[in-house]
Amino acid sequence: MAVPANLPLRAAGLPALLIAGLGLVTLPVSLFAPPGVETFWTEILVRIILVTGFYIFIGNSGVFAFGHVAFACVGGYAAAWLSMNPMFKQIMLTGLPHWVQTLQLSPWAGVAAAAVMAALVALVVGAAIVRLSDIAASIATFAFLVVVNRIYSNWDSVTGGVAPLTNIPQFGSIWPTFLFAALALLTAYLFQRSRWGLMLKASRDDDVAALATGISVYRMRLAAFVLSAAVMGAGGAVYTYFLGILTVDVFYMGLTFLMLVMLVVGGAESLTGVVAGVIAVSTVAQILRLAEQGVQIGGTRLALPLGLQEITLGIFMVLVLVYRSDGITRGRELPLPRFLKANADAR
Amino acid sequence: MRMDAKIEGAAAAAAGEALSVAGVTVRFDGLAAISGVTLRLAPGEIVGLIGPNGAGKTTLVNVLTGFQKPTEGGLEIDGRSALGWSPAKVRRAGVARSFQAGRLFGKLSVLENAQVAAIAAGLSLRDARARAAEVLDRTGLGGQLGQIAGSLPYTDQRRLDIARALASRPKYVLLDEPAAGMSDSECEDLMRIIRGLPGSFGCGVLLIEHNMHVVMSLSDRLHVLDGGRTIVTGTPAEVQADRAFLTAYLGAEGVE
């Protein structure tokens, strides 16, 4: 059987298509859109990074991990520690080592460092967590999220506690965020098509048969756990540089819930589902947020009651689970145009 | 071709190449599932493992593949003790198995199911793909490479399970009731594939099967278990003439 040349670039049809689609929206947004729309779209790009982080582990291993936002928290604070104005660090974060206090890295270096730090934490934590069976692993990741949140909320001299950290430099443009979103998608794609990704997906479908096939399920899961944490760490840093301000509760239950809704709505087993889920849920959430703010008509203000946003998203997720349990994409990828498809199939 | 493999197999057996258990006992909560079983499988031969339900066949297969640690007794692969090895390690030492329930990677394609087995054996993505395509071709699944495994008809799923076991080029392959639920014509098809395994892949086959026609016509030797103990071993002809075998299968009255 002839196996055509397998150049990485030619095989990367799917992420190329997804990235091109995102770029096609980002370009007019960066040129013409009012600030509100640009913020909305930047937030979508950040969420794509974070949901991709979730996806790399959940989508390929089949183990539902609820705690990945903790890695975004680790990454966000790493970014703040490395890039905040040194003057403020010396006043607010007296517990930081002196060399960190005097450091002021660019956001680019900050994102890289955040990814590395989250990956290291994941290597230690994951070594224990991914040994557990599916449900136990899910609960353990959730416990990990709570532990991280408590530590970061109370370690005042290092994290500033629940007080917001300010004077964090911003990217100043939508394009760096777009670039990191593209990088996250490409990373996820290359992983799922790699030897390790394929072995992990096999264990997702049947872990007993995977063991009998000679696959070390533990090692594959740990690899995916660390890689996904790195993406989450980078996402947390990008989020921090986008906001320019950091509070610990940004990376907690609310964000976890939103990310999981996006993953489930889009379809947890395809990369296309990640992008579709983020855009669909963000749009619905944005409309609801505007409705909660209400509109002024004459002298009266029409507004929906607060909290309706979460309720509606919850109902939205339940409806998707009932009628399309594998998400709006049904776990499938975008159909590729013919000129790309021939190459992708010939992997 | 089969004769060549047999001669090779005999040479390998003489050189001590075999998958074997000696005096193996497995107890669950004090209850013995198998006791004192000794069995040897050399490359190139087909050994039939039969016995009534609950005789301990699957427990024995689990011991041979590292899924079950025996309470007593030894497990050897090519002269090395494999006692306490993980299933993955046993597999890498050359012992592959198929499952009664299929246990395919349901959301992967037919090609990927076999490819991932070759990858786990250490091949690159590309070499694994080529080998998977070759094995699938030989098991008659060459036309369905892109199909999702979970959507295959039942008999094709059984064949894919065997192809997946073969994709890592095992020295020993354990087939757990491959003919279960198949019609006569589907059985013939499967028998042709199994009969060809020692010749085309050079491996030894341990065939666990309830279908007497399949087992009797394929096996070089038979190993009969009942109540966790070996009751008879020998060629199909010898076993069929044995009183203990008839009693186990037909009941005491059947022999009278």
Image (cartoon, coloured by chain):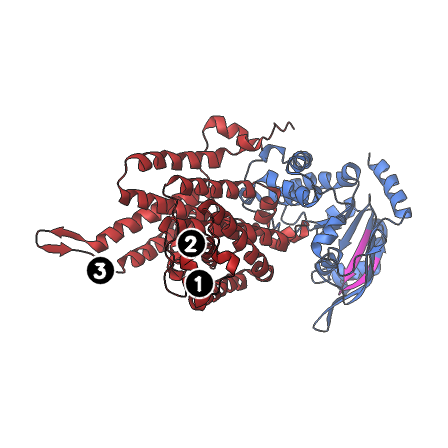
Which residue type does callout 1 highlight? Leu
Q: Residue at x 75, y 45 (%)?
A: B170
Q: Residue at x 57, y 59 (%)?
A: A126
Picture coordinates of residue A163, whole percent (x, y) = 37, 64
Picture coordinates of residue A83, whole percent (x, y) = 44, 52
Q: Quadrant of the C terminus of chain B?
A: bottom right
Q: Nearer the viewer, residue A249 or B200?
A: A249
Q: Nearer the viewer, residue B23 or A101?
A: A101
Report if the CB atoms under discs 1 and 2 are less than 8 Å apart. yes
Identify the subunit bearing mark 3: A
Q: In the displayed image of the protein, which residue is found farthest to the right?
A: B14
Query: Which comes sooner in the sequence, label 1 or label 2?
Result: 2
Q: CA distance from mark 3 to mark 1?
A: 39 Å
Residue B182: say if magenta. no
Q: Colour of chain B?
A: blue
Q: Which residue is mark 3?
A: A305
Identify the subunit bearing mark 2: A
Identify the subunit bearing mark 1: A
Query: Which comes sooner in the sequence, label 3 or label 1?
Result: 1
Q: Which residue is mark 2?
A: A84
Q: Which residue is mark 1?
A: A93
Q: CA distance from mark 1 to mark 2?
A: 10 Å
Which chain did the renderer colour red? Answer: A
What's drawn in magenta, residue-wise?
B222-232
Quarter of the rendering containing residue B239: bottom right
Which residue type does callout 3 highlight? Pro
